[in-house]
Image: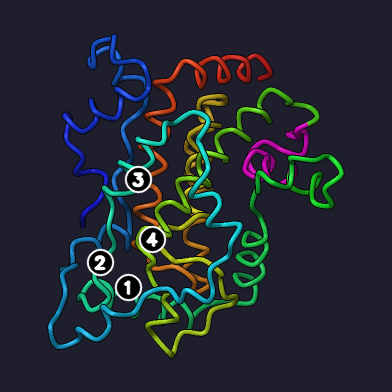
Amino acid sequence: MNNLLKISALALAFLLMGSGLFGQSTQDALPLVQPIEPAENHYQELQLLDESKREEFSWMDAISYPSDLYLDNAILFAMAKPIYLTSSQVDFIKKSVAFPANSSIQTRAELDFLLEIQEKRTPQQVKRVMDIGDVGYWPEANYLSSHQLYEKNLEYLFFEAVEIIGEKCTAENYPLTSQLLQNVIMDMRIMEFSVKFHLLRARPYQLEPNLEPLKKIESPSFASGHTLWAYIQAYTFSELIPQEREAFLELAYEIGFSREIMGVHYPSDEEVARQIAHRMFFLMLHTDKFQQDLQAAKSEW
């Protein structure tokens, strides 16, 4: 798969130039972040399959996410300026990823995997994934304190911390952490929709008529936004509460997999989103502003 694990050391150096840290040696800069964990379970197995086009199913490769379903506010995120990253870094990552061809053996296997999940999903699973599906911090909702979703949005910002640490984790109790997370998710939304609208991958149910998603989503499929926020928050909280790193990553895995149970994402959407999150966090850690905000947030824990 054309994924971020294939980015060379030279490319990493190029990305770091945009962070202002290229005055240090790359050797000094690189150890700041833990290496990404290897892909596991079906993610590991599926990415080994052939991702290239198959001529006999070439009609599938003409299918993309329908333009009449675009959400205008989502497109605006793709045009926004990031806080910790640079626009050139977003653009570089956006152009460094690709999804398996619609007609490929890998995509067919992923669709079959989703059909198998659909047959086995339980009422308990459905409730949990729909609850998770409602979670999501949207920066515009916290621009004005009078916004009807202002408080709920801040609750969603701390969803992972509440799940792992407990109810005490709120924006009111951790205001510096809240500001850090708001900035991180702003950059994450910019990256999410920059990638989505660059590649316009059709949702699984737009390729496979037998898929019955629990909800239809008004944005392209690749890469998964839920998985992107799940992992980039997991990496952020792991810096604040390092002893809980494994628990945060397990929760991020669950959040990503929930999108497959819902029938709205291919496994490759999740796996590449995980890789993008790790690359974003790597770059954020190499900026002065992120380090300042991170150290301030650490003082609350």
Instruction: Say what secondary structure mark 1 lies in.
Output: helix
- Kindly report the distance in space between the C-alpha atoms of the residues bearing marks 2 and 3: 15 Å
Label ID, residue 275 = 3
State whether residue 190 is above or below residue 14.
below
Give the residue at x 51% y 37%.
Answer: 81
Is 293 a magenta residue?
Answer: no
Precedes in sequence: disc 1 or disc 2: 2
Label ID, residue 269 = 4
- Amino acid marked by disc 3: Gln
Label ID, residue 36 = none
- Kindly report the distance in space between the C-alpha atoms of the residues bearing marks 1 and 2: 10 Å
Give the residue at x 67% y 69%.
Answer: 127
Instruction: Say what secondary structure mark 2 lies in.
Output: loop
Closest to the camera, between mark 1 and mark 2, is: 2
Question: Is residue 247 visible to us here?
Answer: no
- Amino acid marked by disc 4: Asp
Precedes in sequence: disc 3 or disc 4: 4
Mark 1 near mark 4, Cβ–Cβ under 8 Å? no
- State the residue in front, 268 or 284: 284
Residue, disc 1: 110
Please state the horizontal and vertical placement of residue 131, each as a whole percent of the image: 68, 62
Q: Residues within 10 Å of mark 4 (few under 14, many from 20)?
A: many
Mark 3 near mark 4, Cβ–Cβ under 8 Å? no
- State the residue in front, 44 or 5: 5
Precedes in sequence: disc 2 or disc 3: 2
* Highlighted magenta segment, given as a residue range: 154-171
